[in-house]
Image (cartoon, grey):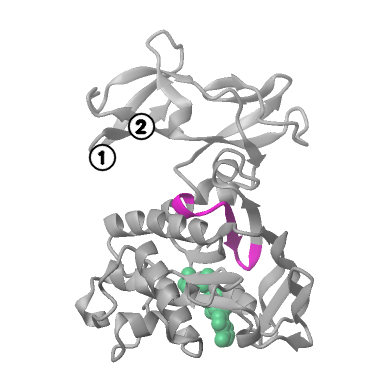
Amino acid sequence: MSVLTLDKVCVAFDSKRVLEDISLRLDDGEIACLLGPSGCGKTTLLRSIAGFQVLQSGEIHSGATVLSTSNFTAPTENRQIGMVFQDFALFPHLTIGDNICFGIRHQSKSDKRQRLAELLELIGLVGFDGRYPHELSGGQQQRVALARAMASKPRLLLLDEPFSSMDVELRSSLAKEIRSILKHEGITSVMVTHDQHEAFNMADRIGVLSAGKLLQWDDAQTLYHQPKTAFVAHFVGRSDFLQGEIVEQGVKTALGVSPLREQQAFKLGQQVNALIRPEYLKIDKQSPIKAALISRQFRGGFYLYVLRLTSGESVQLLLSSLMQYELGDTVGLALSAEHLSVFESE
Ligand SMILES: Nc1ncnc2c1ncn2[C@@H]1O[C@H](COP(=O)(O)OP(=O)(O)OP(=O)(O)O)[C@@H](O)[C@H]1O
């Protein structure tokens, strides 16, 4: 069942459109991430779902309940929404137990005690309920903020860059932990993030926004391997684009002729850009396609090489750091991808 449906949502500030025709659907228990460059409208979209933002047009529903239209905005407190922000916003003068129970403070003592015990167990902080926020690490505080937002069992949880103040290691482990907590509780969630790895770790659905438009709404694998636009291809993962020409067997690039990913509406002879991901390439001594190694970055388990093709274009390649090629080496290169995604040349 759909817990959240947006139908052609538009939002404008002083007649400047910042969200354009956003339509999406999120089913019960699914986790979504909104991804996109700064200023593309992620927070505005989250605020619209929360009821802080009036719509210019379009509708937001939860099941059969209308939450927002252009002339109606259900108050946030009636939306059964929980929220987690980047700065945690825990109450410093309240204990962890009282922070977590803040939204259910009017419930009976025994109900509160039971829910608190469940949540402390879930976030791995049993025994911490008598402490104060400043006595916890940043990661622990963020787990408390999550427990507080989940205490009342909201229908929908909104998270606005909840890990942005944390270092990379902690972000990644917290993202996985929080996903398993949300899945355990079955809470449908929408999270805003700048970080695509976080989105890959967390989300069942990822929405990529650019300049107020939702360019794609898909699972991580589809987004990565079947991007609908060159922007999405470029924004998600490492990418290079080679000039190509549509031929009968697919697309002809400096790497040879490859089949197209799917039936696409391109004409024979049309000039396109073909997406090449580093893992689409392999070193092949026998290959007639030669490339020169022009840069190399050590990344621990692997090297990221940049290779210059005879066309003058360059591509990236990831290879185990147990093997080492020297700058200036010329290698044979072959495509290991069965199909290529192509996009119209601009
Ligand atoms: N209250 C406001 N009044 C006028 N313009 C606004 C307002 N809030 C946001 N905007 C504009 O709307 C656009 C989208 O902003 P929004 O904060 O939603 O982007 P974002 O994707 O969340 O950005 P970031 O990743 O930097 O937080 C921006 O151009 C921003 O300047």
Q: Which residue is mark 1?
A: 299
Q: Does residue 28 appear to the left or right of 72 in the view shown?
A: left
The magenta segment is: 200-213
Q: Position of residue 333 (x, y in %)?
A: 42, 19
Q: Nearer the viewer, residue 158 or 310?
A: 158
Q: Position of residue 25 (x, y in %)?
A: 70, 60
Farthest left residue? Answer: 135
How crowded pointer 2 is (Cα within 10 Å; few <14, some 14-19, many 20+) is rated as: many
Instruction: Say which element carries label 1.
Output: loop
Residue 39 in view in this figure: no
Q: Residue at x 64, y 83 (%)?
A: 51
Q: Are marks 1 and 2 in contact (CB under 8 Å)?
A: yes
311, above or below 237, in the image? above
Residue type pointed to by label 1: Arg
Q: Does residue 23 appear to the left or right of 158 in the view shown?
A: right
Q: Position of residue 153 (x, y in %)?
A: 55, 72
Q: Is mark 1 within 8 Å of ligand 1?
A: no
Q: Nearer the viewer, residue 66 or 250?
A: 66
235, above or below 51, in the image? above
Numbered mark located on residue 318 in the image:
2
Q: Residue at x 59, y 62 (%)?
A: 210
Q: Nearer the viewer, residue 32 or 44?
A: 32
Residue 169 in view in this figure: yes
Magenta stretch encompasses residue 345: no
252, above or below 112, in the image? above
152, above or below 346, in the image? below
Dividing the picture into quadrants, the one containing residue 30 is bottom right
Q: Which comes before the other along the chain, label 1 or label 2?
A: 1
Task: Calculate the distance from the C-alpha at mark 1 to the C-alpha at mark 2.
Answer: 9 Å
Q: Quadrant of ligand 1?
A: bottom right
